[in-house]
Image (tube, rainbow, N blue to C red):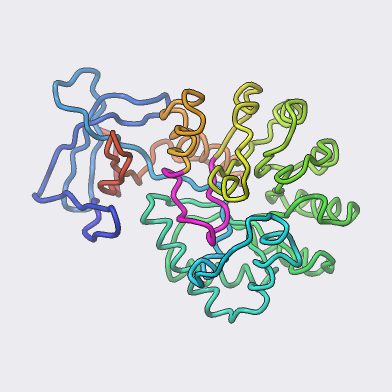
Amino acid sequence: MVTGKTTNNIIPFITSDMKKVHGEILTETGFKKGYVEIHEQNHAILHIKKESTEKKSCLIIPSLLNAHTHIGDTFIREKNISLPRDIEKLVAPPEGLKHKLLKTTNQEEIKNGMIRGLQELKQHGINTFVDFRENGVEGLRLIIDALRQEPVDAILLGRPETLTPTINEINDIINIADGIGLSSVTDWNPSLIQSISKRTKQQNKIFALHASERIQEPIRTIIDLQPDLLVHMTVASKTDLFEVKQHDIPIVVCPRSNQFFGMKPNLENMHDVGNTILLGTDNFMLHQSSIIEEIKYIQEQFPGLYSLEELLLMNTYQGRKILSKLKRSSTPSFPTSWMILDASTLAITGFLDHVEQG
């Protein structure tokens, strides 16, 4: 149904028992003309029509996926402190400012920040996210507890508390989480990271890595770890990207995070190579977790590189198929959670739930 509460730019538009909203409906093969018939009783029906004389001022799309987050950082944004625009000084383990704050901050404050981060995801039309969860088992327990209070579909990728974890800690994380999500390969002992990858794969869990974000890292070392997902690849060469494509590894790009550190995503090379791309918002301490804002950034900075349709498909149908494959689960044939956007501004004007196809 359309939400009955207003938050930021969310405008509930249901005013009667039923309303038709005409627009462009995003299907698996792109936009199709049609309308949504909205019933007040938690029920909406999508009708796809080839011809329509109605004005098309809306985009009607499935709820979005945020493919890379660090939701535990939300509390840092709320401290209103000056953040260094240097990757190593801010986020590199173990001495980056973020990691120092995660170690010294009360766990309840971190968890409450997570809850507000989850609420923010919903406000931006995101009903699934992939989180790289720091602080070992305790970090996972915090986000699991937060999700009980503010449910959102989550893929949780844990990370050991230190760069020298015990085997027991690694096993505990793999058992609790959907997999492991590590920082750069250059942060870790080579034999240890190989062991972590092997143990994760043995349990049929997801193994993901930050890769070539600040410096170009050896692609063979990365590929040999058999990652299911790579994040950034900002300074990877075209040769590196070809290797990634040949091994069918999706890449998550986080344009606004890159911008904060004075960089740009490697999208032109990825487009030329034909890499599979997903979008993420990265650290919650930097900005709001809006995938729509990531899309706007790409359209402004890389005009004509990807169409709006392509960018929306990345983080709806295509993204969910990729994640379902990684989790060894099936993707529902038709999304049940949708949202409505203003076609000119991409502002969210409403949410739809319990949607079926007419």
Most extreme residue toward the left is 16
Across and down, in percent, residue 78 comes to 48, 70
The image quadrant that residue 121 belongs to is bottom left
Depth order, front residue of 256/290: 256
> 242 above or below 312?
above
Q: Nearer the viewer, residue 205 or 227?
A: 227
Image label count: 0
Task: Give the answer, above or below, for where 88 lies relative to 74.
Answer: above
Tell me what residue is drawn at x 21 percent, y 58 percent: 4
| Residue 136 % position (x, y) | 70, 68
Q: Quadrant of residue 274?
A: top right
| Left or right for 59, reference 298 | left
Query: In the rendering, at what x and y percent does residue 75 appear?
Result: 52, 70
Residue placed most toward the observer, 238 or 220: 238
From the viewer's perspective, tell me whether residue 137 is left or right of residue 16: right
The residue depicted at 70 percent of the width and 45 percent of the height is 213
Q: Specify whether 5 is left or right of 216.
A: left
Query: In terms of image quadrants, where is residue 335?
Result: top left
What residue is at 65 percent from the left and 42 percent from the top?
A: 232
Residue furthest toward the top? 51
Q: Reply above or below: 196 against 221.
A: below
Q: Position of residue 193 (x, y in %)?
A: 83, 53
User: Which secondary structure dominates the residues rendered in magenta?
Assistant: loop
The span shown in magenta is 279-293
Q: Nearer the viewer, residue 51 or 240?
A: 240
Q: Residue at x 73, y 54 (%)?
A: 183
Asked if residue 325 lies left or right of residue 357, the reply is right
- Whether residue 106 is in magenta: the answer is no
Q: Quadrant of the C terminus?
A: top left
